[in-house]
Image (spheres, rainbow, N blue to C red):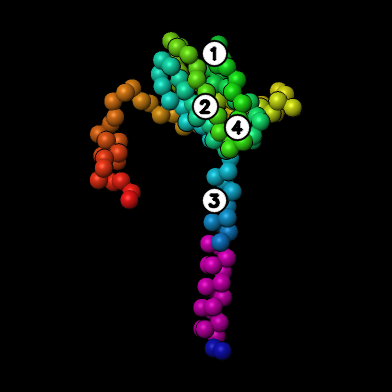
Amino acid sequence: MSRSLRTRITTAVVIGTLGTLLAAGAATANSEPKAVIQGRSTVTAHVTGEKAGARCQIAGKDIAGPWGSVNTAGAVDLTLGSIRTDTKRIRVICEDPLRGDSSLHTVRSDRVSYDGALSPLRQIINSTFFELH
């Protein structure tokens, strides 16, 4: 076997190994709990990837919604009634009821502003042209 062929094979093996490691890292990174927070006057949140049996809540400065239990699929829907304060500082917190406050953590969340009218880009994406068959 010539030296250039050996170099090509070694390079291919190294690149393949790095690709596998990156794919495995991306798969494990997606397993962390996430929340999508929507609304302005009535705030809702959808939490996924949380440990089953945990309790979650929408909270902020001087604001606390009811606790919701995470189902076996790792999801929970939360609603915070009508509020009139700054909703930019709202977050979703979860805890393990067996461990109490020591397990309290903030769930990584994305804010979605939706006031009833879809943006032009969202209308295009939701059109029947892009439906999967």
Residue on which the image places disc 4: 71
Q: Nearer the viewer, residue 27 or 116?
A: 116
Give the SS element for disc 1: strand
Magenta stretch, residue numbers: 3-19
Asked if marks 2 and 4 touch (Cβ < 8 Å), the reply is no
Q: Residue at point 45% right, 20% down?
A: 43
Q: Disc 3 designates what residue?
A: 26
Q: Please name which of the two marks, 1 or 2, marks the residue nearer to the observer.
A: 2
Quadrant assignment, res 101: top right
Q: Position of residue 55 (x, y in %)?
A: 63, 26
For the point 51% across and 83% down, which residue is it? 4
Marks 2/3: CA distance?
A: 26 Å
Residue 79 coordinates in the image, percent (x, y): 50, 20
Q: Could you tell me the amino acid type at mark 4? A: Asn
Question: Earlier along the polypeptide chain: callout 1 or callout 2?
Answer: 1
- Element type where label 3 sits in the image: helix
Q: Which secondary structure, mark 2?
A: strand
Q: Tell me the distance, in whole angstroms, between the alpha carbons under discs 3 and 1.
A: 35 Å
Compute the Cα span from label 1 to label 2.
17 Å
How far across and down, in percent of the image, does residue 60 sit?
54, 17
Q: Residues within 10 Å of mark 1 (few under 14, many from 20)?
A: few
For the N terminus, the quadrant is bottom right
Give me the disc on residue 63: 1
Tag 1: amino acid: Ile
Query: Which residue sits furthest bottom?
Result: 1
Cα separation, mark 4 vs mark 3, equals 25 Å
